Amino acid sequence: MSIIFVSSRAARQVTDAVYPWKRGSIMFTFKGEFFPDPAKASLSEFYEGELAVFLHTLRRNGQLIEQHWNLVEQNGVVKLYCIAPDEDALEPRHYNRYGLEALGGLIQRSLRPPVFRVIGKTLGLSDACACESPSYYVLFSNFVAEYSPVSCGDCNLPVPLYKLPGDSEDEYYALRQWQGEYKACDSLFVLSGVGEGFGYREISEIESPLTKEGLEICREMSQKSKRPFYYFLHRHYVPQESTCPGCGQEWKLDGKLHGIYTFKCDQCRLLSDAP
């Protein structure tokens, strides 16, 4: 199975020169070209079928940033403009089983394999983790998050899902579902008067259904990665509480971890902040 991937060394050199302090991978904008075979499918059938499946499979694997792509048709060629978390994010070696299957179906309906080219560094978006082997991870999100809900414990940058230890069978369904639920509850807390209390309870209480779901995901991901997974518990209204809500032990740090976390419990694998 083939795919053409054109890297941009110039884009990387400019990035390193302008952002010498960066600790993570810079988000990159790509141009992709797809060549549907009109003898096998109409343009709309190709777009709504094989191409849609392929793109959403990459999105679910963390290789494309959600909602940041545009498609244009020109002279029978479908052109994609999208954002990915690293310069090599769209290379087939990062595909899971579903991505490879989707690519195969796409190529069967195409005149030739798709082509991806790096255009350059994407402005205005967060960097992504570039650590080779993080010592621990954090499950963290909010209502405006567009990236992976997993952060690196060492650099505090989001970890693309395809970089998480696991296997090619995993589409991170539970993880993505939890993030959607967390964003909904956090949105209620921040933006809603009527639903503020419900939203806050879900993101702040150790016994809430949302927190229990997140802690279970952390346990499962920890087993797969062989690394600790911490859960972020947002405690806006009890910032001075010095004991862990899980075990009752002292958990206040001497200073702020990554400038965000004021509390950390290694036994319960919980992190929290203070306004």
Image (tube, helix red, strand yellow):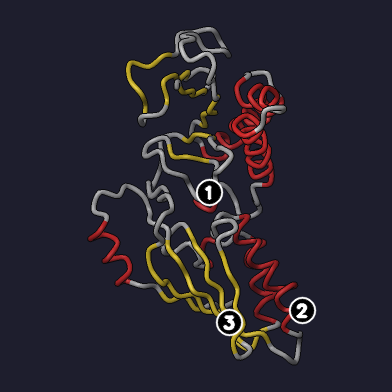
Rendered-image quadrant of the N terminus = bottom right
| Alpha carbon distance from label 3 to label 2 | 18 Å
Is 212 on the left or on the right of 158, as rendered? right
Q: Residue furthest front?
A: 193
Number of numbered discs on residues? 3
Which sits earlier in the primary sequence, circle 1 or circle 3? Answer: 3
| Residue where numbered disc 2 is placed | 45
Instruction: Give percent across and percent down for residue 130.
Output: 38, 50
Instruction: Give percent across and percent down for residue 112.
Output: 60, 86
Specify the quadrant of the image occupied by residue 97: bottom right
Rendered-image quadrant of the C terminus = top left
Q: Nearer the viewer, residue 225 or 123?
A: 123
Amino acid bearing label 1: Tyr
Residue at the image position 42 percent from the left and 63 percent from the top: 28
| Residue where numbered disc 3 is placed | 113
| Residue where numbered disc 1 is placed | 147
Which sits earlier in the primary sequence, circle 3 or circle 2? Answer: 2
Q: Does the residue at mark 3 contact the one at mark 2 (Cβ under 8 Å)? A: no
Judge whether 143 appears above or below 58 on screen: above
Q: Nearer the viewer, residue 132 or 250?
A: 250
Judge whether 206 appears above or below 155 on screen: above
Judge whether 250 appears above or below 31 on screen: above
Q: Nearer the viewer, residue 101 or 14?
A: 14
Amino acid bearing label 3: Pro
Is 178 on the left or on the right of 65, as rendered? right
**At numbered mark 2, what does the secondary structure look like: helix, strand or loop?**
helix
